[in-house]
Image (tube, rainbow, N blue to C red):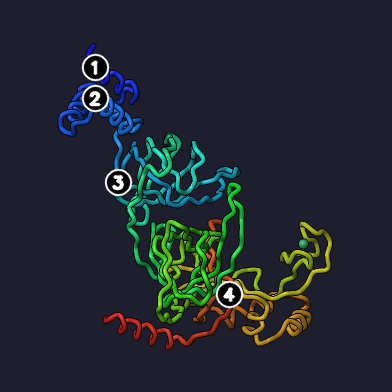
């Protein structure tokens, strides 16, 4: 056997037989004749080029750009841009679903993993075998299912195309991929944590622009309250049912000499699905007042609303009287359950807690008298509420109301008109 044939054999073995001999020969000749490389160097180059990377015939890799909804058995080499988890129940047992964004040099795609056979982390490069795709909110989504196999690749072996989208804060959604945001830092607190025994600095707070406000987490990049910054290459994840902006050393953060007028404009309830919202304004109509509104009694220890005088955790207690309203507000695009506290309920009723208790006593202890008053005062009333909205599977959209105003129907239609004018309709 001559040197050349021997080199072909060596390459064939070193690459695990995933490359045909004829192809090896052709490439080896090319290296030697065209690039003038010595045989031994050419051999080493080809082995390192193809080591573990050449797909065999039934395992072709597809690029993220080529993915379309409804594809089966796809193989990819991607980098995990973000990964989150969600706990859900199936037939009474708890399961964990992972979701996030993955990408290659052609683009970024959302994924959902129902099972993971390797412990996947953000930044990992991974070969995905036998996944499939679905359509999700007009986008293609990659699904890692029961029969999908994952294999970790060397770090940084996949580069992700930085198709960073400029976005306003009101638009930020966990499925957007990498974004660029310009905003004013409203608050920023620093703390130190250890991740895998490495000390990390976390800056967290909120950032706002002329459309709204969002919590952020910055890993190792100092952020100062009052600064206007441009963050390029951040991504959106959800934490406790609310979207937040996350960035780290792979993002760039630049201080800008800009004036930003902080405004919060009413959002459509529909746009809060899957992301919640920080300190958002919603304008709509009360379409339902839920049971458990009005005069309630709570455990003095844990604050649970009680039916009698027994707390499931603290046993027999002397319940504390409280007021609240749980109302469904609909804005025509969707509905959100709004939770009003004692002070706000007192404002709605025009009575304080003591007066409410007296009123109930007058009615032989029947609290439904308060519920009736609330129905009468609130049902079908248009109002504007502001607060944090949390989206959790178990409860749907819930707002913890910070403040509210009743609106005139006329106000709303005038507003809609001027908004349409602004938009040039
Ligand atoms: Zn309790």
Q: CA distance from mark 2 to mark 1?
A: 8 Å
Residue 409 seen in the figure: yes
Secondary structure at numbered mark 3: loop
Asked if marks 3 and 1 touch (Cβ < 8 Å), the reply is no
Q: CA distance from mark 3 to mark 2?
A: 40 Å
Pointer 3 residue:
67
| Residue depth check, mark 3 versus mark 1: number of the one nearer the observer | 1
* Quadrant of image for the N terminus: top left
Give the residue at x 36% y 41%.
77
Asked if marks 2 and 1 touch (Cβ < 8 Å), the reply is yes
Q: Earlier in the sequence, mark 3 or mark 1?
A: 1
Q: Earlier in the sequence, mark 2 or mark 1?
A: 1
Please tell me whether residue 388 is drawn above or below residue 36 in the rendered image.
below
Quick one: 39 or 198, which is closer to the camera?
39
Q: Which mark is residue 401?
A: 4
Q: Residues within 10 Å of mark 1 (few under 14, many from 20)?
A: few
Q: Which mark is residue 60?
A: none
Q: x, y (%) of residue 41?
A: 28, 28
Q: Earlier in the sequence, mark 4 or mark 3?
A: 3
Q: CA distance from mark 4 to mark 3?
A: 42 Å
Q: CA distance from mark 4 to mark 2?
A: 74 Å
Pointer 2 residue:
39
Q: x, y (%) of residue 137?
A: 36, 56
Please tell me how many numbered marks the rendered image carries: 4
Q: Which mark is residue 3?
A: 1
Q: Earlier in the sequence, mark 3 or mark 2?
A: 2
């Amino acid at each position: 056997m001559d040197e050349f044939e021997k080199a072909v054999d060596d390459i064939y073995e070193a690459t695990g037989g995933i490359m045909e001999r004829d192809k090896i020969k052709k490439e080896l000749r090319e290296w030697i004749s065209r690039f003038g490389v010595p045989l031994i160097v050419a051999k080493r180059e080809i082995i390192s080029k193809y080591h573990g990377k050449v797909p065999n015939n039934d395992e072709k890799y597809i690029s993220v750009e080529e993915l379309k909804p409804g594809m089966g058995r796809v193989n990819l080499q991607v980098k995990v841009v973000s990964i989150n988890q969600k706990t859900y129940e199936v037939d009474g047992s708890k399961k964990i679903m992972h979701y996030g964004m993955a990408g290659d040099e052609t683009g970024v795609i959302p994924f959902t993993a129902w099972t993971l056979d390797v412990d996947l982390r953000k930044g990992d490069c991974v070969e995905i075998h036998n996944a499939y795709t679905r359509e999700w909110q007009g986008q293609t989504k990659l699904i890692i299912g029961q029969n999908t196999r994952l294999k970790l690749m060397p770090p940084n072996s996949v580069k992700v195309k930085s198709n960073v989208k400029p976005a306003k804060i009101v638009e930020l959604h966990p499925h957007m991929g990498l974004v660029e945001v310009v905003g004013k830092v409203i608050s920023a607190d620093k703390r130190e944590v250890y991740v895998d025994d490495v000390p990390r600095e976390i800056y967290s707070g909120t950032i706002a622009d002329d459309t709204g406000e969002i919590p952020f987490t910055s890993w190792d990049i100092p952020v100062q309250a009052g600064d206007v910054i441009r963050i390029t290459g951040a991504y959106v994840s959800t934490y406790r049912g609310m979207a937040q902006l996350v960035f780290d050393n792979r993002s760039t953060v630049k201080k800008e000499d800009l004036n930003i007028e902080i405004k919060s404009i009413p959002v459509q309830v529909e746009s809060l699905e899957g992301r919640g919202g920080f300190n958002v304004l919603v304008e709509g109509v009360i379409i339902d007042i839920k049971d458990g509104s009005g005069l309630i009694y709570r455990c003095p220890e844990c604050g649970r609303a009680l039916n009698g005088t027994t707390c499931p955790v603290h046993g027999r207690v002397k319940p504390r009287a409280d007021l609240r309203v749980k109302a469904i507000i609909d804005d025509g695009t969707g509905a959100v359950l709004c939770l009003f506290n004692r002070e706000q309920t007192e404002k709605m009723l025009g009575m304080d807690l003591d007066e409410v208790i007296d009123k109930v006593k007058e009615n032989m202890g029947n609290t439904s008298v308060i519920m009736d008053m609330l129905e009468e005062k609130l049902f079908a009333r248009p109002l504007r509420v502001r607060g944090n909205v949390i989206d959790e599977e178990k409860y749907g959209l819930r707002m913890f109301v910070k403040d509210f105003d009743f609106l005139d129907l006329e106000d709303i239609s005038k507003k809609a008109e001027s908004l349409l004018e602004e938009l040039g309709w």
